[in-house]
Image (spheres, rainbow, N blue to C red):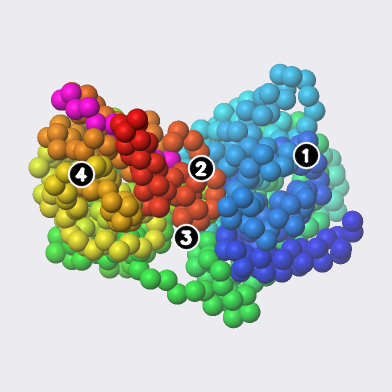
Amino acid sequence: MSFDLQEELCQALREFIVDHVSETGGHLASNLGIVELAVALEREFDSNKDRLIYDVGHQCYVHKILTGRKEAFDRLRMYGGLCGFMKPDESPADPCVTGHASSSVSVALGMAHARSIRGEKYHVVAIIGDGALTGGMAYEALNDAGASGEPLIVVLNDNNMSIDKNVGGMARHLAKLRVSPRYLSAKNGLRKTLSHVPGGKSVIAKGTKLKKAIKSVVLPSSMFEQMGFTYMGPVDGHDLQALSFHLQLAKRLKCPVLIHVMTKKGKGYSYAEHAPDKYHGVSKFDPVSGQLPGSTPGFSAVFGAELAKLARKDARICAITAAMPSGTGLSGFPREFPERFFDVGIAEEHAVAMTAGMAKQGLRPVCALYATFLQRAYDQLIHDVAIAADIPAVFAIDRAGIVGADGATHNGTFDVPFLRTIPGMTILCPANFAELRTMMTRAIYHNETGGAMAIRYPRGGEGAFQENTAAEWASHIRQSDKPDVTIVTYGILINEAITAADSLKQQGYQVDLWKVNEISAKTEQLCSGLVSSFAPHVAVLEDVVQNGSFSEAILRAAEQIGHTCQVHCYNVGNQFLPHGSVREIYQLCGIDGASVAQALADIMKCGKDESIG
């Protein structure tokens, strides 16, 4: 295909992406920005054989369209439809699952090593954004890959953005590299001059040292070259011919190569170009006007507003996040308290350890991370926070539980299980905005244990439950004299539990309903007293995996006191969940109110039938 036809293809791809994402929601600006690069990669490589690994993977829409999944975009990110990230069971062109940043070079190097060991022939390419280069894992991989000498291509997609504007030393380093055409101009000028000087052509042929000297003056040596990569660029990421030329050259080199490609996030759609952060991940919208739908305040916004309110009264309060100020509701905090706001980039391990240091020295830091990304900092939670026992660090865990359309890589279904294993950790579980505010004040100021506290809350808004029971570790929401079943839950699943209780009551069953507000070693010790009052059947309703869930504390407490109740666990199971709406995933797991009520009614009816027989 000629380059002219490919340029027409790029225009058609942009129109297709805008049209379909406006109908389904999805990642817009990042996919518009990578169109030419993705087309060039598909042109120069066989993605069914060569391994193209898109870091994070949220910018893989063009790749999916060009590898046979165009017709599936009508159901992008819907239950049973096309995943918004790379997923190997969709196509052999997706070499691995992606969803978290900074891992592509590590995976690519592993594949390159496997290729060499097995004597196979294919190319391995990691496509990583400048935002992902704020993550430490990327440097571990680059350091190893450069030293390995393994043939490998790393394409650095530099759009000066992750979701929010990039921060840190790497952003400054790339800014220097972006002006490197000065070096290229100087080198070409030198060549032209020497070609007209007697003996000049010989100097050009043997002028490696001279070129290196000029380069060191005009452009500081890139860290990539120092790591062992052959550095190419910067290259215009919207110039198909230039991209193809550099990719062809990189394929011929039998060494680690890094191609620095400059792109514009949101390219070709003016609204996304002017506000790439706003159009990064979008719901359904009007593609003509660019008008995004209005949204009601969610837990993230309430958290950000409350933290700012508390910070106005206390100069010790600081906010830390990992490249997610807007996603965690903190976008307004740095405008009001710039000296007390710290965006560390995609570096959750660093964020947690730094939070520990700040808390140890008398500040009141609050570290806001998505539940799925907090997984990266498990070691720091143990080593830097918990072992010291008296560090009053606060962790705001956003997107806890089921997140919906982003699917398996983004669901926050492991936070309660892994935090429960850490001695001294307290998990607070607000069910609504009022409880979130109360729990934030408690976590920052009224931490009886002096240790770390985490506050977990979901993406989106609150449900119908509006009581503020945050002052108690557990609240008796519904009471019966002689209950047939006791339902126990925490957080926003109280709304599903109430639905289940109401349904069972209509069927003639008596229901006790308990809402747990705090999960910790202390409260789990109190479970024995709680369990002693439980009905013959106990249902524990959670939006986390089974292993390590709070239901295990209930089971253990029942065993310890010899209670003969039957404990029924309703959670997501020990599995990774597909993408789809939150409601659909609740129903799939059987943790929606109607499913829980039906399951319990069936169990109790069976028990009655057996007793009659």
Q: What range of the chain is rendered magenta?
A: 561-572
Residue 399: percent from left, percent from top = 39, 52
Q: On the image, numbered disc 1 is attached to which residue?
A: 48
Q: Which mark is residue 85?
A: none
Q: Nearer the viewer, mark 4 or mark 1?
A: 4
Mark 1 closeness class: few <14, some 14–19, many ≥20 residues within 10 Å: some
Residue at the disc numbered 2: 577
Q: Are marks 4 and 1 in contact (CB under 8 Å)?
A: no
The residue that mark 3 highlights is 165
Secondary structure of residue under mark 3: loop
- Sequence order check, earlier mark of 3 and 2: 3
Q: Position of residue 111 (x, y in %)?
A: 66, 29
Quarter of the image with the C terminus is top left
Disc 1 on helix, strand or loop? loop
Of the image marks 4 and 1, the number of the one nearer the N terminus = 1
Q: Quadrant of residue 76?
A: bottom right
Question: Residue 603 location in percent, x, y?
Answer: 36, 38
> Given the image, on which type of amino acid does mark 1 rest?
Asn
For badge 2, the amino acid type reads Leu
Nearest the eye: 188 or 66: 66
Camera sees residue 43: yes
